[in-house]
Amino acid sequence: MGTRQASTTVYADPDVVFDYLSDVSHLPRYFHSMTRAQAEGGNKVEVEADLDGKEVTGEAWLEADRDQRTLRWGSPGPSDYHGELSVAEADNRTSVVTVTLHTERTDDPAIDAGLAETLSNIATEVRAQEK
């Protein structure tokens, strides 16, 4: 199991950023490949994703810690895929969003591309919400 991590600056208050990102209905707007997410009660989330042109449905878990501005997620199964997203205050109304993935596919360039797309989507979506 390896780790991949990337960060971006978002020009918005960290609480605003975290509130947007922790809303399950917003996950498909910013997470690379995710096409649908629906809260199922507790920390369970039903998700759909487009993986290499194939639509995949599965169960995942998502935990939000508002005090730490951190999301943790994963999916059950043999791969033990999981990750974290944190929102830190950089300075006045500016945030740093960091996404960390724990995956067996660390040598796959698509992982870094997916992280970059996710972070770009986060910056775009949060800016759009602030208008």
Image (cartoon, rainbow, N blue to C red):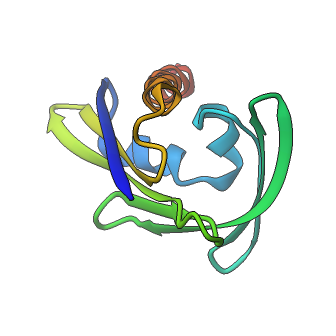
- Please report the residue visible at 46 percent of the width from the left and 25 percent of the height from the top: 109
Report which quarter residue 128 is drawn in. top right
Q: Is 110 displayed left or right of 52 in the figure?
A: left
Q: Is 40 displayed left or right of 83 in the figure?
A: right
Report which quarter residue 36 is drawn in. top right
Rendered position, 14 above or below 126: below
Location of residue 14 in the rendering, given as x and y in whole percent from the top left corner? 31, 43
- Please report the residue visible at 41 percent of the width from the left and 41 percent of the height from the top: 17
Rendered position, 11 above or below 6: above
Rendered position, 33 above or below 56: above
Q: Is 98 displayed left or right of 110 in the figure?
A: left
- Please report the residue visible at 29 percent of the width from the left and 33 percent of the height from the top: 7
Location of residue 97 in the rendering, given as x and y in whole percent from the top left corner? 32, 38
- Please report the residue visible at 43 percent of the width from the left and 24 percent of the height from the top: 116
Closest to the observer: 120 or 107?
Answer: 107
Location of residue 69 in the rendering, given as x and y in whole percent from the top left corner? 34, 57
